[in-house]
Amino acid sequence: EAQLVESGGGLVQPGGSLRLSCLASGFRFSNYWMTWVRQAPGKGLEWVGNIKEDGSQTRYVDSLKGRFTISRDNAKNSLYLQMNSLGPDDTAVYYCATVREFHSGSVNWFDPWGQGTLVTVSS
Amino acid sequence: DIQMTQSPSSLSASAGDRVTITCRASETIGNFLNWYQQKPGKAPKLLIYGASSLQSGVPSRFSGSGSGTDFTLTISSLRPEDFATYYCQQCYSTPLTFGGGTKVEIK
């Protein structure tokens, strides 16, 4: 069974940095694009960005470009989200998910999702 | 960016009711539309992909329809476990965007 487990969340001061991890199991991790989605408390879902199977391409929502970096280590079945210059608006649960698609450029969807890890930015 | 607008933002319904949630895209997206269900404190769960394809394991009372800019998620007969928040998401172009959510509550 495909499974994703996030870690690395916690309390961080404004202006600080944090690195989240997502460990994949039960599927061939290196064959899939991966994604990060976040959800502020009581709010809706916001896509953060994607990374290609081999890590050669990344895409981000414009508002986070330059502060957030997605990377992966296929040998470790792991996805990462490096977050810098954090502010209170970055307080959220961060989810990783696998990007599934029929074929490249076709309809794609997120499944499965991890359980999420909470990041709180506060002094 | 493609804006996704869901309506209503919340609704109250009883078990056994037929429920319809709509999602409108700010520009045409073909069938590049997915639906997710989220329960409190849990991760979202995929229900429908490609506007109308039912994810494996999802009950057949859930169905999706539409193309272009207007889409619908229908629950044919609401069950107690269906009380949750539902999100649409366009996968046509980046940035990928979600609707604001529809909270289905018990009447």
Image (cartoon, coloured by chain):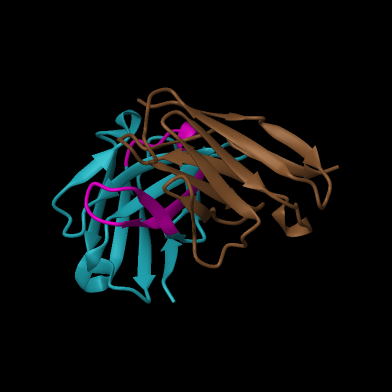
Chain colours: A cyan, B brown
Q: Residue at x 25, y 51 (%)?
A: A51
Asked whether residue B91 is in view, the answer is yes
Q: Quadrant of residue A27?
A: bottom left
User: Which residue appears farthest toward the top when viewing the image?
Assistant: B26
Q: Nearer the viewer, residue B23 or B94?
A: B23
A88 vs A36, left or right, is right
Specify whether B50 is left or right of B86. left
Give the image quarter of residue B105.
top right
Q: Position of residue A43 (x, y in %)?
A: 58, 36
Q: Image check: B89 left or right of A17?
A: right
Task: Work out whether B69 lies above or below B65.
Answer: above
Quadrant, the N terminus of chain B: top left
Position of A52 with respect to A101 (left or right) is left
**Vertical position of residue B6 compared to residue A12: above or below:** above
| Image point (21%, 45%), residue name | A58
Residue at 63% in and 45% down: B74
Does the magenta segment cover residue A100?
A: yes
Q: Considering depth in this image, is A90 or A48 the residue closer to the camera?
A: A48
Residue B88 image point, x, y percent: 51, 40
From the image, which quarter does the C terminus of chain B lie in?
top right
- Magenta stretch: includes residue B87: no
Report if residue A91 is visible in the image. Answer: no
Residue extending furthest left? Answer: A56
Of the pair A109 and A122, the residue shown nearer to us? A109
User: How far across and down, in percent of the image, does residue A5 sit?
Assistant: 44, 66
Up/down of A76 relative to A118, above or below: below
Q: Count every numbered label the image shows and give the total.
A: 0
State which region is magenta: A84-111
Which of A96/B62 is in front? B62
Q: Residue at x 33, y 34 (%)?
A: B95
